[in-house]
Amino acid sequence: MPEYAPLELPDDPKLAQNVIHFARALRRAGLPIGPGRVIEAIRAVAAAGFTRRDDFYWTLHAVLVNRPEERAVFNQVFRLYWRDPRFMEHMMAMLLPTVHGAQEETAAAAAARRAAEALLDGAQAPEPPERQAAPEAPEIEIDATQTASGEERLRTLDFEQMSAEEAAAAKRMLARLTLPVRPLPTRRQRPHPRGAVPDWRRTLRGALRTGGEVTALAWRRPATRWPALVVLCDISGSMSDYSRMVLHFVHAVANRQGQGWARVHAFTFGTRLTNITRHLRQRDVDTALNAAGAEAQDWQGGTRIGDCLTAFNRDWSRRVMGQGAVVLLITDGLDRGDPARLGFQMERLALSARRVIWINPLLRWDGFAPRAAGIRAMLPHVDSLRAGHSVASLAGLAAALSDPGDTGEKARLMALAPPS
């Protein structure tokens, strides 16, 4: 814990009310804190006392923090709420837009902005100096009685056209999406009372208890197992806005229990292939994506899909593609390499996977046609082709996974592809 100067207590302290407001700020920042834990925190502080700041910090920490990934959020909110005498100015500064390149940037903690937004609770960030001096624009009244709701509009809005506030709301919507999958039948048999195949060994073993007389047949049926999900996400310059949103969705899928996936493996590629699977296992989405961004050094760079698929098929395919894995390939298909090599590597990928679902943001255009050589090389080797430019398009992935015959836009684009 960082060191701070001793606090001067007021004449009429209201510690219990302050602890309640502090717990509310933590809840707004994402920590699962209910009324019961707030009462326990007040009782713990009453038992431990308020004589030493270290004791007070660790008393609240012991009650309100359950997971390691919650420590960063707790530290930020605690520092701003209890220790920093100028915490309001500090939080307002966090919400100001930054100008890249004007000065040396300081890497903020992953939970700093979330802590500021939780404590401000709807307060508006101060306007930049150039905006403060601008004349006030005339107020325009619009009749919105016939317009669609904001959430419905946000579902269909292109990720690239979203403002910072809309992108934050879209990320919260993506965190609630599910990606269910059906279990796969195996050759192994397991006992089941309504099975279709007699289990003669269990039947004869049970007959030994009745002197060799068979009184009932034991049955069995094929066992099931859950497939793995492999995500290959393009983080080149043309895909940067979409890849960040897709990785938020992948993080939610990887950390949600009960969806059925055996494991979720995630890779990013631009000019090279990067495995970010272990980073996405962290519960806090900000910490996970910051670590993934630090691991992948080719953000907003060029695109070499063929080279990256070669590295994946050579180094990772046998490790992560076993037992009927489903592959989500998120890219626009604009490759700078050899189309023949790209087509060969896509064929290898398709032969190793149970299904290959291609998520292409370019499908948002009505007049899109596969004119690029890379898109034509990839198209024959995917099972389904879908758009991935909005929350609604990503929500449609559930239909592609539940229906084995779903091809999306593949058939239409195959008919539009010019002859090679």
Image (spheres, rainbow, N blue to C red):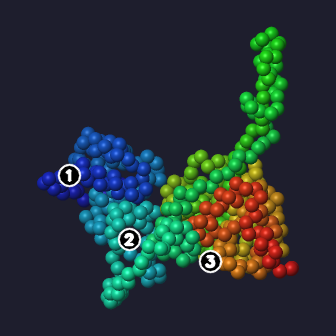
Q: Do we see residue 374 in this rendering?
A: no
Q: Is residue 68 above or below residue 397?
A: above
Q: Quadrant of residue 268?
A: bottom right
Q: Earlier in the sequence, mark 2 or mark 1?
A: 1
- Judged by depth in the image, the label closer to the viewer, 2 or 1, is 1
The quadrant of the image that shows the C terminus is: bottom right
Name which residue lies at 68% across and 64% down.
232
Mark 2 packing: few (<14 Cα in 10 Å), some, or many (20+)?
Answer: some
Circle 1 SS class: loop
Position of residue 143 measured from the top left corner of the image (x, y, whole percent): 42, 78
User: Looking at the rendered structure, which numbered label has been put on residue 94?
Assistant: 2
Disc 3 residue type?
A: Gly
Q: Judge from the rendering whether residue 276 lies leftward or rightward of residue 416; answer left or right.
A: left
Position of residue 22 measured from the top left corner of the image (x, y, whole percent): 31, 54
User: Looking at the rendered structure, which numbered label has been put on residue 14?
Assistant: 1
Between 239 and 336, the one lying in front of the other is 239
Structural distance between the alpha carbons of marks 2 and 1 = 28 Å
Q: Earlier in the sequence, mark 3 or mark 1?
A: 1
Disc 2 residue type?
A: Met
Q: Judge from the rendering whether residue 7 lies leftward or rightward of residue 395; answer left or right.
A: left
Circle 2 SS class: helix
Q: Is residue 42 above or below residue 269?
A: above
Q: Do we see residue 79 in this rendering?
A: yes
Circle 3 SS class: helix
The residue sitting at the front extreme is: 146
Pointer 3: what residue? Answer: 237
Between 249 and 384, the one lying in front of the other is 384
Structural distance between the alpha carbons of marks 3 and 1 = 53 Å
Position of residue 271 measured from the top left corner of the image (x, y, whole percent): 68, 73
Mark 1 packing: few (<14 Cα in 10 Å), some, or many (20+)?
Answer: few
Position of residue 177 measured from the top left corner of the image (x, y, whole percent): 57, 58
Name which residue lies at 38% across and 72% down.
95
